[in-house]
Image (cartoon, helix red, strand yellow):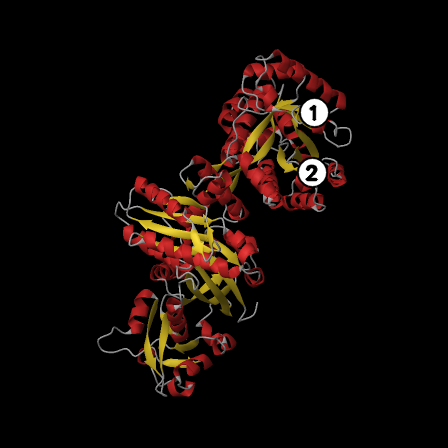
Amino acid sequence: MAVGEGIVWATDPRTTRVTFISSQAERIFGYRREAWHAEGFWSDHVYPEDQARLLRFRTAQVDDGVDNIVENRMLAADGTVLWVSDSSRVVGSGADARLVGMLFVVGGGHGAELAWEKSDSAFTHNVDGMVVTDKSGLVLHANLAFSALTGRAAHEVEGKESLDALLGSRDDIESVTTVAQTRDFWSGEWWCRRPSGHSYLQQATVIAVKKDVGEISGYIGVFRDLSHEKSLLARQKKAPCYDPLTGLLTPAGLKDRLRDLLVSDVGTESQLAVMAIELNQLDYLLRAFGHGAGDRFLTAVAHRMSMLASDIACVGRDAGDTFVMIVQHRDGSDFFAFAKTLVHELSLPFSLGQHEVNAKPQLGIAISPAHGTTAELLISHAHTALQKAKNEGREIQDFRDESVVVHSRTQQLRTQIAVACKRSEFRLVYEAQRQLGSRKIIAAEALLRWKHPTLGEILPANVIKLAEEEGHITEIGMWVLKQACAQIRRWQEMGHTQLRATVNVSLHQLLQADFAPAVMEVLHETRLAPEFLELELVGGGANLNSRMIETSMVTLANQGITLVLDNFGAESAFLTRLCHWPVKKVKIDRTLTQHIHICSRSNAVIQSLIALAQGLGVEIVAVGVETADQERFLDIQGCHAIQGNAVNRPLPGTDFQALLERDAIETTRDLVDSVPVQQWASTVYGSSAPGMETLRSWIREGKIVPEPLKVGRKWLVPLTARYMGGM
């Protein structure tokens, strides 16, 4: 690490969770890059005495929406205390607000003092004007950018001027350094004048730098010229927001107008509608008569729509032959009446010289607040309704129709599934697989769940389907594999040493040449032995004859991973592949198990499938088992294990862990009821079983003991008295 090195970062100001951090962070601070994304990581690694000050600083910055620089200490992985300068700004607003910034190391070592005095390069060449003062506010150093900004050379202010004087403080304005003492920082902007007479808009930020004991040792002033930025913003506001051909609002201008109208309607019962209108004759005109005729047609349409809009609506041209109209202050029925009038008027012929053209309009409607309260959402929903109208040959389509809602929801999910993993919207639940006979839990199947922030829980089948269609199945599948393997390994370390992980794998993933090596890398990272991983193969429309699929399977099987065939008996295409695929286990589909004792043919089919699996030398698991009668039938037929509500419903990790502990207690209790404790310990621990004296001392001293002895603590004490003759 060298002074002057820096990283780029972004955080969510509501949770302080890091959403992006550049790769230099790992080298500079010593923490793995992914560790920074954990909630609370950043604040936990700020030097303890700086944490409260930094929190106040960030809170005020977000509230004020200003750019700022803060100086504080961070703890590196090796325990070193690093001084950093953090320049940040608020991007976006409301729920979309983000903090982005650049952090530079400006000093290091235990007991670091005023950091900028140790960082000549970072200070001298910073793009912002900067000064460093002593605790009284007297300027000690000024950098090159300060001289360029203010027109004053460093020697003119160093040792001669106070920070308050530089900032133009007057008697009627409280001293900047006094404010900085109480708030740790101060920020403001105003018009200044250089010695040359040139005026500029200056932003200044003052940070109080404190020693370990909280005593102020000096101040840092940061100066920035905002003139160009303000001028650019003003020019952007004055930029044309009207379409040069039609004179209607552009998409950006229309969106701004809609935002203004929505703000003015807040707290009222007013409604407004967004109508997306498409004309279906423009392509014909362009082909038949050229672009000139097309332009005249669009101009005529715009004129007619403007006449209809009058003072109740505003009109914009979205793109090509699509227009958007915002209609204000009517109830729902009036909106539809107006839409019918609009379609009727636009359906009347347009005269283009010697020709008459029919526009053949189609229209989609979204109404606020029922269909959204933001400009983006309302315009999007209006276009979704328009697309549905085109698909079904309708003139007018309301977004409220269920079919449109479903279509819009699907489109929204398609665009957001790619980032759901990064936003921590995915989670895993676990379904137990119980061995028939012993009734022990032998495996946990990891099942993916997606809780969308606005749409709620998404059906699992829809998640997989969308992931495959949008090309994200490999990325999401590997995330599931890593999470599941890591969780199973943690449970093994707690004492559930024989527990296996079952993870669903789309055959699309096996088409990737690097899939098998990637699986082995995950096992290496999570320290899960290959024999404790089961990959459950699901169809997904992949080409079953692909040689790549078979190659991947053979590679995985040779490493000791168990391959499981899903939907056994339901996917007939799979049956023909059993001779070639190295499958060791099959799962009987729930569509068959749910009809046990209801349909005699289902019983016969299940008996045949079990016999077929036994003939192939593979284990059989029945899924969707709901009742004790179904469980008994499957046990009699020779099924090895079951899943379903008869075992447990899918559970979050913490609840599944509790289930494992209860299962360990029940299994161990069954043993203890019939065997002495020493024999029980040998059964549980094998060759590493503790001796009788060790067991006695564990209980007597109240020490934590390994699983599953620990989970049986509550009943082990009376059993010890029973078998060992007291404590």
The quadrant in which residue 317 appears is bottom left
Tell me which residue sits at (37%, 77%) in the image.
134
The image quadrant that residue 43 belongs to is bottom left
The answer to whether one can see residue 698 in this image is yes
Q: Gap in Å between the C-alphas at discs 2 and 1?
A: 18 Å
The picture places residue 697, in percent across and down from the top left corner, at 55, 32
Q: Amino acid at mark 2?
A: Pro
Vertical placement of residue 551 versus 88, above or below: above
Q: Position of residue 607 (x, y in %)?
A: 67, 15
**Residue visible at 33% across and 41% down?**
337
Residue 674 percent coordinates (x, y):
60, 17
Q: Position of residue 253 (x, y in %)?
A: 39, 60
Relative to residue 692, is residue 92 drawn left or right? left
Dot placed on the residue nearer the N-terminal end, 2 or 1: 2
Direction from residue 153 to residue 290 in the image, left or right: right
Using the rendered image of the protein, determine whether residue 79 is visible from the camera's viewpoint: no
Q: Nearer the viewer, residue 174 or 421?
A: 421
Does residue 143 appear left or right of residue 589 in this picture? left
Q: Looking at the picture, tell me which residue is in the foreground, 152 or 460.
A: 460
User: Which structural element holds mark 2?
Assistant: helix
The three-letter amino acid code for the residue at tag 1 is Glu
Q: Which residue is mark 2?
A: 530
- Left-right relation of 460 to 371: right
Which is nearer the eye, 566 or 685?
566
Residue 143 occupies which quadrant of the picture? bottom left
Residue annotated with mark 1 = 619
